[in-house]
Image (cartoon, grey):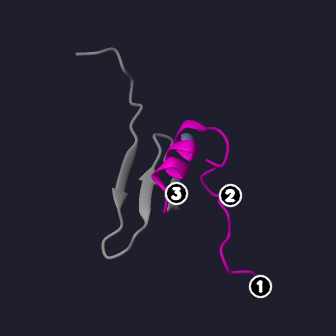
Amino acid sequence: MSGRTGEVYRIGWLPGTDLLHGTCHCGAEHTAQDPVEMWDWMLGHPEGHREREQRRRGNAP
Ligand SMILES: [Zn+2]
């Protein structure tokens, strides 16, 4: 076994869409149309990965 400790990234296509859905090892989730954008997000880990403070989309009061 290797010495890696739980750095797991998951990326998959959302069924029926052109969107990628990624989950970071920290538990943050992200969707993007562009794989490059997805990896930018993944590799930029601390930035934009707050569990609860993700971008709000179209849900402003
Ligand atoms: Zn993260």
Q: Secondary structure at mark 3?
A: strand
Mark nearer the N terminus (2 vs 1): 2
Q: Quick one: quadrant of the C terminus? A: bottom right
Q: CA distance from mark 3 to mark 2?
A: 12 Å
Magenta-highlighted residues:
33-60
At label 1, counting other C-alpha atoms closer than 10 Å, the crowd grade (few under 14, some 14-19, many 20 or more) is few
Mark nearer the N terminus (1 vs 3): 3
Q: What's under tag 2, amino acid-wise?
A: Glu
Q: Are marks 2 and 1 in contact (CB under 8 Å)?
A: no
The quadrant where ligand 1 appears is top right
- Mark whose residue sits in front, 1 or 3: 3
Mark nearer the N terminus (3 vs 2): 3
Give the x, y percent position of residue 56.
68, 70
Q: CA distance from mark 2 to mark 1?
A: 16 Å
Q: What's under tag 3, amino acid-wise?
A: His
Q: Is residue 4 above or below residue 13?
A: above
Give the x, y percent position of residue 53.
68, 58
- Residue at 49% of width from left, 57% of height from top? 34
Dividing the picture into quadrants, the one containing residue 46 is top right
Residue located beneath label 3 in the image: 30
- Residue at 52% of width from left, 57% of height from top? 30
Residue located beneath label 2 in the image: 53
Q: CA distance from mark 1 to mark 3?
A: 23 Å
Residue located beneath label 1 in the image: 61
User: From the Cβ of disc 2, is ligand 1 less than 8 Å away?
Assistant: no
Q: Is 49 on the left-hand or right-hand side of 60? A: left
| Residue furthest right in the image | 61
Q: What's under tag 1, amino acid-wise?
A: Pro
Q: How many marks?
A: 3
Q: Is 17 on the left-hand or right-hand side of 50? A: left
User: Does the rendering let one see residue 44?
Assistant: yes
